[in-house]
Every structure is written in structure tokens, then in C-alpha cells.
Amino acid sequence: MNANTESAAGPWPTAEVSKRVGFGDILAMAMFALRGNLMRSVLTALGVIIGIAAVIVMVSVGQGTQAELDRTISNLGSNRIEVFGGSGGRGGVRGGAGSISTLTDGDIAAIRNEISEIQYVAGQVRGGTQVVNAEQNWSTQWIGIQPDHFATNGWQVDRGSVFGERDYSGGAKVLLIGTTVADKLFGNSDPVGASVRVGRVPFVVAGVLKSKGQSGWGGDADDIIMLPLETARRRLSGSMNMAPGTVQSISVGTARAEDLPAAERQLNELLRQRHKIQPGAEDDFTVRNLTEIVSARSQTTRLMSLLLGAVATISLIVGGIGIMNIMLVSVTERIREIGLRMAVGAGPREIQLQFLAEAMLISLGGGAIGIALGIGGTVVTSRFIALPVELNVQVIGLATAFAVATGLFFGYYPARKASRLDPIEALRQQ
């Protein structure tokens, strides 16, 4: 009897030692059984391999996309509200927001002093011009700024220095240039300290702005020059018909995102009061909360990540169903073997644990191969398809947990079915 049992199903313990069967013995017997049908075991694990690899690649792409969105949001400036002047028209043609300069230095001071939630306030004027350095010239956008502009819009200086207090108050002829302008005018030369001509006015380059890449509206954020607000008013805005002490827009920043709704509400009330707008009358300014755009883009990214994760999960479920089907077939094929083992002392617990161990080995083996393929697929996706990916230990841990859960969930029913067989009926099977 023992010889027949061993030849049919491996080294199962005799009745005298069956009570001492440990996890190592069960694992050895499960490996012995899987080796007997190695090709079938590999093909069964294929579904898990594909599912785990898909989970890793999809989740990495989703996280990479979210991280790229966070960087874009950071470039836009966090916790920011933009206020533009009113809209007007000429000859029946109506302009957009900011076409009339209804915002003033007094509005900026009032916002800073009267709304406690607001941490940064900066007025701006802007326009387009030709910038010339020696024989090189470039058409770009200029913007006159106040000190808080850097904090509210997320700008930093890469080389050189920011404007000093005297530069702002005295209308100094200094400017900061974006990396695109620096490349077009200076090539590989260092522009800091060099002289350029903006329109017809000579300026000194105080520094080069740190690159921000694409702007939130799809343009080149680095194709820009910045100069002190008072300098822009005196030197560049003469043809814009702006009244003294006015600005085209005001950037407002709060310390926390939670403060934005209250700050926006108070901002509207304050400006309506200062501009003497009667109840029910149309505002002569426009307030835009960038968090609405950020929220919409974040929600889109989250939905895309959920979609990718759902596709990968479906692949894993299909692989798990394959494991369950094969294990059920295995139980049917090995009914007589199960009966022999029960006859020599194996209990339902040992039978159940062995078949569950076989399912777990298939799932974990497939998971290990799937993790390797997923990491390789992530590298390929990042390098050759140019999709943003972010692979971390949590993703690999998640894939491992999925593999374990798949083996336990889809292996439990076949294992339970095997353990509940009647040994007498099982031995009658041919």
C-alpha cells in the first residue's frame, strides 16, 4: 500500500506519523504534484503572470501621470486666485476679461490688509515686445510684476538674482528672462549682467528664471521676460492707454487650499465695495479660481487610473479563474489518489492544505515572473513609449498581495472540494 501511494502521489506520511505533518511536508508534496504536470502548471500560471505584469505597468503609468499633473499644477502656482479687470468694447466689438484696467494699486493694498486668508498679493501688467541682444532678436511676452509674483505663481531664479526693493520702487531697468529667451538671444553664453534692448529701452539682465516647461494653458512658460511693475508702467506700457496706478490683473495666493473659497468670497465683496458696484449690477472685474481647473484635471487623472487598474484587475481575475478551473480538473483526475491518502491516515485538513498549497505555488510563481515582467514593461514604457511612469515599492507590494489573494481565493474551493471527498467512494474510482 505504501509503495503504491508513493508512486502515485509522492511521499505521503503513513498513518503513524500523519499527525506530525507540517507545513514543509505539505509544501514538498505540492511541489511534487506540480512537477508531475509541469507544462500545465506553467500554462495555468500564465494568466497570473499577465495579470500581475498588467497591474504593475498600469498602476505605474497611473501614478506617473498623477505625479506629472502635480508638477504641472506646481508650475501653475498653488492655491491661487486670478483677478482680471473688466471687459469693454469699441465700435460694437466687446473685449474679454482684462480689456479695461479697472484694478488699482489701492485694490492690491486693500486685499493685502483686509482679507486675513490671503498670504500673497501681486499686481501685473503685460504685453508683447521685441528683445534684442547684439545681432540676435526675439519676439516674446513681457510682464511687470511685484515681489509676491514669485510665490503666487511658483517661479524661481536659476541664475543671477531676483529684483531688490530699490528695483521695484525706483523703476530700475533690470529684467529676468526665461530659458527660451536666454537660448534664443545668448545661446550657450551666460546672460547674467548682459545688456539687452526691450523695444527701444536698454535693460540689464539680472537673472535667468528656472525652467517651467509647458504652461497650464499649453504654451511655452519659459518664453517670457519679467521686470518690476513700476518699470513696466514707465517704459513699456505707454501705448496701452492705462491710467496711472492701474494693473491688468492681480494674483492672490493663500497658505492653504481650504482657505480659497472664503478668500474668493471676501475678495468679490471687497472689490464690489471699493468699485461702488450696486446690488444686482455686473462686476467690472473677473475672478478665476485655478483650483477648479486643477480639480477637473485631477479628477480626470484619477478616473483614468481607476480605469487602468480595473483593466489590470480583470486580467488578474481571469488568471485566477484559470487556476480554479485547472485545480478542479486536478481534483477530478486525482480522486483515487486522494482516497489512497485518506486511507493511510491523511485527514481532510491535510488534503485541503495540499491543494491550497498547489494553488498558492502556481499563483506566487506566476506573481514572481509577472513582477519581473512588469518592472521590465515599466522601463520599456518609460524609455520607448515616453509615457510618465512612477514605479515604487508599494506597487510591487500591491502586486505581491494580489498574487497571494488570487491563490487563496481561487484555490480555496477546489481544495475544499478535495477535502470533502468520501474515501471509500474515492477508492472506487478507476
Image (cartoon, rainbow, N blue to C red):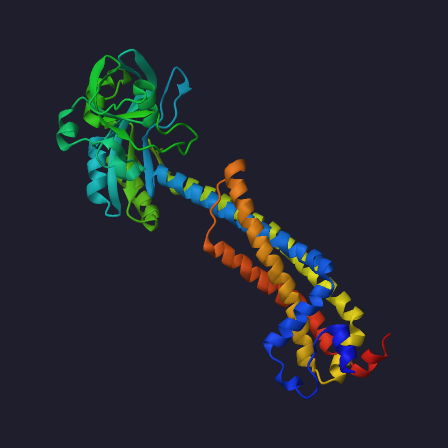
Judge whether 71 appears above or below 332 on screen.
Answer: above
**Is residue 401 rendered to the left or right of residue 332?**
left
Q: Write down the quadrant of residue 171 in the picture.
A: top left
Image quadrant in which you'd find residue 121? top left
* Residue 119 seen anywhere in this rendered image of the structure: yes
Nearer-the-camera pick, 234 or 66 = 66
Nearer to us in this view, 164 or 396 = 396
- For this view, does 31 lie left or right of residue 390? right
In the rendered image of this protein, does residue 380 appear above or below residue 51? above
Q: Position of residue 426 (x, y in %)?
A: 81, 78
Q: Quadrant of residue 203?
A: top left
Residue 165 or residue 180, whichever sits in front: 180
Name the residue rendered at 21%, 15% in the picture.
201
Identify the residue shown where x is 20% and y is 16%. Answer: 202
| Quadrant assignment for the C terminus | bottom right
Q: Quadrant of the N terminus?
A: bottom right
Return the residue nearer the eye: 267 or 173: 173
Residue lying at the far bottom in this picture: please name it.
Answer: 16
Question: Left of 391 or right of it: where is 364?
Answer: right
> Taking the image as drawn, is residue 310 in sight?
no
Residue lying farthest to the front in this orientation = 3
Residue 404, how many percent across, how many down? Answer: 58, 64
Q: Is residue 27 above or below residue 322?
A: below
Horizontal side of residue 316 vs 283, given as left or right: right
Count the labels in the image: 0
Image location (x, y in percent) of residue 409: 63, 66
Counting from the top left corner in percent of width and height, residue 393 is at 46, 55
